[in-house]
Amino acid sequence: MSWLSLALSALVALFVVPAGYRALIAAGMTRPNYRGQELAFPLGAATVASALVALAPLAPLDALLDEGLLEPEFARWLTYVVGIAFLGLFDDLLGRGAATNTARGWRGHARAVASGELSTGAIKALGALALAAFVLARRGEEGAQYVADIALLLLATNLLNLFDTGPGRAEKVFALIAAGLCIGAWTAVPLELLGPIVAPVAMGAAYTLRERAMLGDTGSNVLGALTGIWILTSLDETARIVALVVILLVTAYGEFRSLGGLIERVPPLRYLDSLGR
């Protein structure tokens, strides 16, 4: 029955995401991309709004049907995703102009905090930390594993933001990770768990790939949040530690070097990056 929730949310996204895109353009909410073109921004707000609108038919049906349409853990993770979307939107709307908002990356935000100033990015990071600790508090993990899972969810939430430097790039990385988790564990549980949110993300990719809109932190952080949730719910403790180390290494690389530059220098990655544009 969970696949029906994916289908219904996809149907809702067919109407809500395009309406959100048009509303951003009409409101003058645009931002120049890497080529100087003015694109609708942040499209991530429209995809999250679509997921919430999809709950209008899904929530009553879930309560009425014996088997249900939504996974039991969906409400827990929806809390995290919506919270992250709000923090990303806060950074997107207020993260430019003020002197305290010039910090970029983990090091920049850490320096801002150490100097007694809070950039919008630092506020977002602290809020995400609080959300991660909250949603993971009652999952049964304790001690070091609880701390490791918080770190994993927090770093994964930021991960896709590091790749959001080209049209549709973050969505492609997200799709590759999702495919790897599903194929590796030979299960579609991740898609079933978060289907109502995944469908609008897929619809939004049609706009970012064609350079009509940009996700913003609102969208890229939501993609990262979904990635972290899938890792946490698909892998055992040992595999999650390995995933944490890998994400930590990628994040560290992104702090000092350009992940987009790395993709451009590796022909197979450059080819995948160009697909659909």
Image (cartoon, helix red, strand yellow):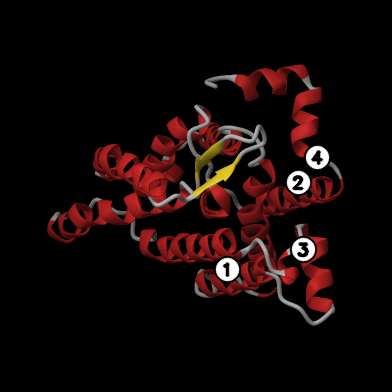
> Which label sits on residue 258?
4
Residue for point 69% across, 52% down: 238
Under circle 2, the secondary element is helix
Q: Nearer the viewer, residue 168 or 243?
A: 168
Say whether marks 3 and 1 touch (CB < 8 Å): no
Q: Badge 1 is on which residue?
A: 132
Mark toward the viewer: 4 or 3: 3
Percent position (x, y) of residue 205? 47, 34
Taking 39 as reference, is 53 left or right?
Answer: left
Q: Decide which of tag 3 and tag 2 comes sooner along the chain.
A: 3
Q: CA distance from mark 3 to mark 2?
A: 25 Å
Percent position (x, y) of residue 258? 80, 40
Q: CA distance from mark 1 to mark 4?
A: 27 Å
Q: Decide which of tag 2 and tag 4 comes sooner along the chain.
A: 2
Looking at this view, name the residue that lies furthest to the right: 256
Residue for point 33% across, 50% down: 50
Q: Badge 2 is on which residue?
A: 246
Q: Amino acid at mark 2?
A: Val
Does 192 sit above or below residue 275?
below
Q: Nearer the viewer, residue 51 or 72?
A: 51
Q: Badge 3 is on which residue?
A: 103
